[in-house]
Image (tube, grey):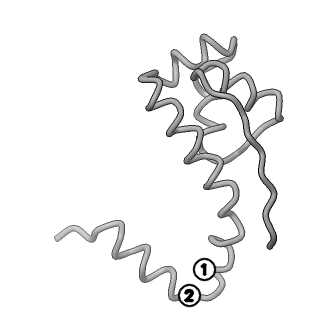
Amino acid sequence: MAISVDKVFKEKMKDASFREEYEALEEEFAIARELVKARVEAKLTQAQVARKMGTSQSAVARLESGKVGSISSIKKYARATGKRIQLKLVAG
């Protein structure tokens, strides 16, 4: 019998140290979600975005995993998907 990812995640979130580490990465996860959303909306593969950026598919995969690189890389990604960056700082 397989265990669902959601069930495992809910169990892990009961652990305070896991939850703290997960929540500390929320900003990176949010950036990753936005990048993937832009690519999907543009109906592009990672390889297609990479070609438009002049980089490798693995570099795009790293950006989409939350291992965010430079602002320059994100700007190139945005242009490749027909988007632009809008930065907003909010109260913590």
- Look at 66% across and 84% down and name the residue there: 17
Looking at this view, is 51 or 33 the one in front?
A: 33
- Look at 57% across and 19% down and name the residue there: 49
Mark 1 vs mark 2, CA separation in Å: 6 Å
- Look at 51% across and 30% down and name the residue there: 39
Relative vertical location of residue 45 with respect to residue 65 in this rendering, above or below = above
Disc 2, SS: loop
**Local crowd size for mark 2, using a 10 Å CA cut-off: few (<14), some (14–19), many (≥20):** few
Amino acid under disc 2: Asp
Looking at this view, is 41 or 21 the one in front?
A: 41
- Proximity of marks 1 and 2: CB atoms separated by less than 8 Å: yes
Looking at this view, is 80 or 13 the one in front?
A: 80
Amino acid under disc 1: Arg
Rendering coords of residue 23 (x, y %)? 65, 72
Q: Kindly identify which numbered label has been placed on residue 61.
A: none
- Look at 60% across and 11% down and name the residue there: 51
- Left or right for 13, reference 74: left
Which residue does the numbered mark 1 point to in the structure image? 19
Disc 1, SS: helix
Rendering coords of residue 12 (x, y %)? 49, 80
For the C terminus, give its image quadrant. bottom right
Which residue does the numbered mark 2 point to in the structure image? 15
- Left or right for 89, reference 32: right
Relative vertical location of residue 18 with respect to residue 74 in this rendering, above or below = below
